[in-house]
Image: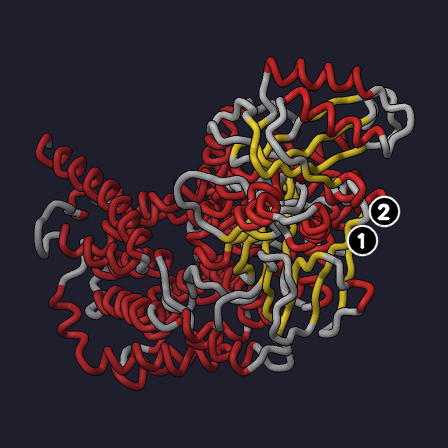
Amino acid sequence: MHDASHTMLITMAVAMSMGVFLTVIARRINVSAIVLLLIGGVALGPEALGLVNTASLGNGLSVIVSLSVGLILFEGGLTLDLRGYRPVASVIHRLLSVGLLATWLTSAGAIWVIFRFDVAFCLLAASLVIAPLLKRIKVNVNLHSILHWEGVLIDPVGVFIAILCFEWLGAQSRELVLARFVLRFVWGIGLGVLGGIAIHRLLRSRLVADDVINVFALGSAILIFGAAEALFSESGLLAVTVAGFVLGVRGPGHLKEIRQFKAEITDLLIGTLFILLSARLELAQFQSFGIRGALVVAAVIVLARPLNILVSSVGCGLSWREKGFLSWVAPRGIVAASMASLFALRLQEAGFENAGFLETFTYSVIIATVLLQGFTAGPVARPDPVGWLIVGAHRLGRHVAAFISQTLHLPTILIDTNAQAVSAAQAEGLNAILDDARDPDLKEDDNFQEIGNLLALTDNEDLNMLLCDHWSDVFSRRHVHYWSAGKEVAGEFTGEAVWVGLPKPSAISGELDRGEATILRTGGHVPESAKNSRPLITASDGLVKLNAGGLLPEEDFDASLLLRREADYLTTSIGPRRVLRIEGQPSVAELLSDIVSHLGGTIPGLPVEQIVQELVRREEFFSSALGHGVAVPHAYSSSIEERACAIVQVPDGIEFNAADGEPVRLLFLLLSPPGDAEGHLETMAEIARMVSSESTRSQLLEAESSDTLWDIISRSPAEGA
C-alpha cells in the first residue's frame, strides 16, 4: 500500500512540475507547448524513464481529468467577448452546427472507408477531433473572434456528441440515449446560467472579501461542475463553460483578477494533463497505425476542416484568404486528448478490440496539426499588424488617434487610466479603454490582435520608455515610440523618441483646449499657411511615419498631421528687441544689471534695481547655470503684466559657478508676473528642451550677431530643437 501511494505521489509531482517547466520553456523558445508536453509525457512514462505511472492512479485519473477539463473550460467561458462575437455571429452559429456536422461526418466517413470499423465506432472516433484550438497568432479581429468562440464552445458541444456516440455504441435502448442527451444538454445550460448569475451576485454583494475572490471563483466552478455531474454525468463541462461565460458577460469588478488567476491555473492543468495522458501512449500503437492511419489524419486536415469552413462561411463576407486560414488552422487540444484517453480506458474495460484506436487516432491528429499548422499558420494568417496603441487619451492623443483611424483607416486603440479622458475619447467615436498600459494581460487581449505599434504619450518620459520596453516583445523594438523632452539619459532604451522639443503632451492638450494651438490635417500638399507648423505624422501608402526631426520628409506623402502653436511660450516672450550681445567679461552683477536695464527699455516702469538685487541674491544661493555654457536666471515681478525674456550672448564667457565649471556664454533672463506660474515654468521648460539639443546649442553659442541669434531662436521650436 505504501509503495502504491509513493508511486502515485511521484507520478503527480513529476507531472505537475514538468508540465509547468515544459510550458515555460516552450514560451521562452516560442514553440507550441503541446509539442514539448507530448514529447515530455512519453519520455517520462513507462516507455522511457518510468517516472510517470498513470496506472497507479487507477480511477483517480478520470476524476483528475474531468475536474481539470471543467476548470479549463470555465476559464474559456470567462474569456468569451460579445463585442467580438456580434460581427461574426453567423459564422460561429454555422461552425457549431452545420460545420460541426460536416467535420464529424467527413472524418467518420474517412475512418469507415479506410478501416471498415463499425459505423457507430467510426462516429465516436470522429467526434473526438471536431474541436479546434487557437494558437497565439496575430490575426485580424474577426478571424480571432471566430476561432476563439469556436474553440471554447465546441469543446463542450463536442464532448456531448462524443458521449452520445459512446453511449450509442453500447446501448440497448437508443431512445433512452437520445433522451439522456437532451436532458444532459438542458441541465448543463440551465445550471450554468444559474451558477454564473449566483457567483456574480455574491461578488457584487461584497460578501466575499477581496483577498479570497479568486479562490471563491475557483471553488464555485468546482461546485457547479460537481452539481451538474451529480445528476447527469458529463454535463459538468457545459455547465462550467456557460457559468464562465455568464460571469464574464456580467462583468464583476474583479473580473480581470479572476481571469488572470484562472489563466494561471489553466496553464498548470493543461501541462499536467498532457504529461499524464501522453505518458500512457505506447510507440507500438502508432507503428501499427501505419499508412492507413496517416491517410485518415490527412483526410481530417485537408478534407474535413476545409469542408467545414466552406459550408459555414457561405454568404458571410469572408475573403478567400480568411477562409483559407480558417481551413488550415485547427489544431486539437487537451479536451480531445482527455476524452480519447477516457473512452479508450472504458472501451478496453468493456472488451472492445479496437479501443486503442481512439487514442492513437486523436493524438496523431493533435501531433500532425500542431506540427504542420503551428509552423505555417503565421505566414498564412497575414502580414504584421499595422494598428496603433496610443497611451494617453488627452486632447493631443485623441487628435493623433483620430488621424490614424479616420484618415488612414488603421486600427487604433487609446488607453488611459483617466476615466474622464477615456469617456471623452469614446464620445468622439474613438476606440478607447480604461486601463493601465503596463498590465501584462493586455498583450493577450482579443482587442489587440490588429495592433502592431505603440506611441507612449504620457508626461512622464521614464514611464514612456518603460512602456516601450514592456511592449517591445510584442510589437518589436522598431515599432515602439515615445514622446521625449529631449533630456540625456544613461544607458540604452528601447524605442524611438519622437517630437523631441515639444512641451509635455498635457501642456499641448491644454493649449489645444484653450485655442492656443491648432491641429491641421493636410493631404500630400501642405498649404503655405501651414509652413511654419510642426509636422507630427506623415503617411504614405497606408504606413505611418512619426516625424522625429520636426521637418516634413523630402519624399512624397499622402497625408500629414501638423501642430501649429500660437502659444509658443519662448518666442512670444522675447522678440528681436530683447536679443543682444555683450562683449568683454563683466561681473555677474554687472551683467544682470545690463540685461535688466535693456529689458526696462521695452517695459515701462520696470523696477530695474529691485529686480537686479533679487537676481543677484538668488545667484549667490543657487546658480542658474544649466551647464554647457548656458544659464537661465529668472524671477517674478508684480510690476509687469506679461512674461518677458531676454537672450544674451557673451562671447568671452563669464564665471557663473556652473556645476560643470564651464563659463557661461549664453543667458536666458526670464521675468514673469506672479499670476503666470504655468507660463513661467513652460517657458523655462522650452529653454531647457532647446539647449538640450547639441546642434541647436552650438548654433546659439556661435552666432555672429544678435540678428542671427534671433533667427535661430525663432525657428528652433518649429524644427523641434
Amino acid, disc 1: Thr
Q: Is residue 364 left or right of residue 412?
A: left
Question: Which disc, if any, is residue 265?
Answer: none
- Position of residue 185 relative to residue 504, above or below, is below
Image quadrant where residue 341 sits: bottom left
State if disc 2 and disc 1 touch (CB < 8 Å): yes
Circle 2 sits in a helix, a strand or a loop, which is it?
A: loop
| Whole-percent x, y for residue 201 in the image | 64, 33
Q: Is residue 146 left or right of residue 639?
A: left
Task: Farthest residue to the front: give it.
Answer: 584
Instruction: Identify the residue shown where x is 53% and y is 40%.
Output: 487
| Whole-percent x, y for residue 287 in the image | 13, 73
Q: How many marks?
A: 2
Nearer the observer, 470 or 441: 470
Instruction: Identify the residue shown where x is 78% and y is 39%.
Output: 578
Amino acid, disc 2: Gly
Image quadrant where residue 623 sits: top right
Quadrant where the image shows the N terminus: top left
> Quick check: can you spot residue 354?
yes
| Whole-percent x, y for residue 85 in the image | 62, 61
* Residue that label 1 marks: 518
Q: Please rate how many residues cluster around mark 1, counting C-alpha atoms within 10 Å: few if below 14, some from 14 to 19, many from 20.
A: some
Nearer the observer, 284 or 708: 708
Question: Which disc, if any, is residue 515?
Answer: 2
Task: Farthest residue to the bottom: give it.
Answer: 113
Nearer the observer, 197 or 43: 43
Q: Is residue 367 left or right of residue 461?
A: left
- Position of residue 150 relative to residue 633, above or below, is below
Nearer the observer, 98 or 11: 11
Circle 1 sits in a helix, a strand or a loop, which is it?
A: strand
Instruction: Identify the residue shown where x is 20% and y is 58%.
Output: 39
- Position of residue 561 relative to residue 240, above or below, is below
